[in-house]
Image: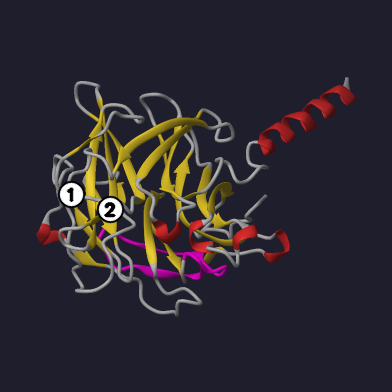
Amino acid sequence: MKHFKFAAAIIAAASALSAFASNPVLPGFHADPEILYSEQTGRYYIYSTTDGVPGWGGEYFRVYSSDNLSDWTDGGIILDLKGRQVPWASGNAWAPAIIERRHPDGSYRYYFYFSGHNPATDRKEIGVAVADHPEGPFREIGHSIVAESPTGRGQQIDVDVFQDPVSGRCYLYWGNGYMAGAELSDDMLSIKPETITVMTPKGGTLETYAYREAPYVFFRKGKYYFMWSVDDTGSPNYHVAYGTSDSPLGAIRVAEPCNILVRNPEKEIYGPAHNSVVNMPGGDEWRIVYHRINKDYLDDGPGYHRQVCIDPMYFNADGSIRPVVPSN
């Protein structure tokens, strides 16, 4: 009986590990993954940039769903920037974010934020589409909601959306070359201009921990965590740094150490960054979702041959994030 129990424990442990023992988790090339756990469906969803296209020329967004973070089902295209769904955009469908909101009547609504190229202004802008289910159909509102940089430079891309559990208010974050945040309107379809705040973390270089792009915000045990990507998406050194703040639009204190997801050449893991995270329901178990460069394309378009991966993310007793161990 003791041998049986021991064997059963080994099998159970192996099963628990197997869900995170095979990266990448999605077929083909995808980047900038956004993960959502839906209360409505009890499933996980990944939304991403469609990769493998020279010049980051992807034109649409797909969704994948899973009930175990291991086996993913392709839910198809949810938003096409070359068709009639998004009249102001012509392509460059990049780096989405999504949030689930439950209404007082018990119904759910999903707000999908994204960036695209506006040929009328010849720049990247941020838009929003709305649905009643994580897989759509999504209805784009007909115009962008962030069109200009509050710093006069950089690109309006890499959007993130966050609901503050303390106040219940929702916030949008974005920026390449700078980081900005603003409170969203009650209908989630615009930002409040008077709340726009430039929040770029201070210090470092693009080789160490200076902010480049891809802000991501989450809340845990009284702390607001801000994550960002460092260097360039085509660089093997592309990696994730983080800091904390006392409020959703407050000054960011860069953590020490701050780089928590970096390359591992021994495992042929390069450029692991542009992440999101998910708190698995029912406890304090977390996963980080990110992309990395396909090792076979380091010298042939590394910036647009990226693949989505998932790994555990752990915290120390003081709330600091432990370095993530990227896996194959």
Give the magenta-colored segment's residue range: 233-258
Q: Nearer the viewer, residue 204 or 59?
A: 59
Q: Residue at coordinates 33% horizontally, 66% vertically from top-left?
A: 176
Q: Which of the pair 322/62 is nearer the observer?
A: 62
- Name the secondary structure under disc 1: loop
Residue at x 16% of width, y 62% of height:
121
The answer to whether residue 219 is above or below residue 247 is: above
The answer, for residue 211, to whether it is visible in the render is yes
**Residue 224 seen:** no
- Locate the N terminus and report the quarter of the image it occupies: top right
Q: Measured along the vertical axis of the image, is residue 116 above or below residue 168?
A: below
Q: CA distance from mark 2 to mark 1?
A: 9 Å
Classify residue 194 by image quadrant: bottom left
Left or right position of 287 against 99: right
- Inspect the image, locate mark 1, and give the three-letter code of the amino acid beneath it: Trp
Q: Residue 61 at what x, y percent from top left?
A: 37, 42
Specify whether residue 110 is painted magenta: no
Residue 208 percent across, percent down from the top left: 50, 76
Whichever of labels 2 and 1 marks the residue nearer the N terminus, that label is 1
Q: Nearer the viewer, residue 12 or 54?
A: 54
Residue beneath disc 2: 116
**Which amino acid does the dot numbered 2 rest on?**
Gly
Residue for badge 1: 88
Find residue 68 and report its image quarter.
Answer: top right
Q: Is residue 253 magenta?
A: yes
Few, some or many residues within 10 Å of mark 2 (<14, 14–19, 20+)? many
Decide: few, some or many residues near mark 1? Use Cα within 10 Å; few <14, some 14-19, many ≥20. many
Whether residues under marks 2 and 1 lie with C-beta atoms below 8 angstroms apart, the answer is: yes
Q: With 228 as the anchor, is 81 left or right in this view? A: left
Q: How many marks?
A: 2
Question: Of the numbered discs in the image, which one, if any, rests on residue 129?
Answer: none
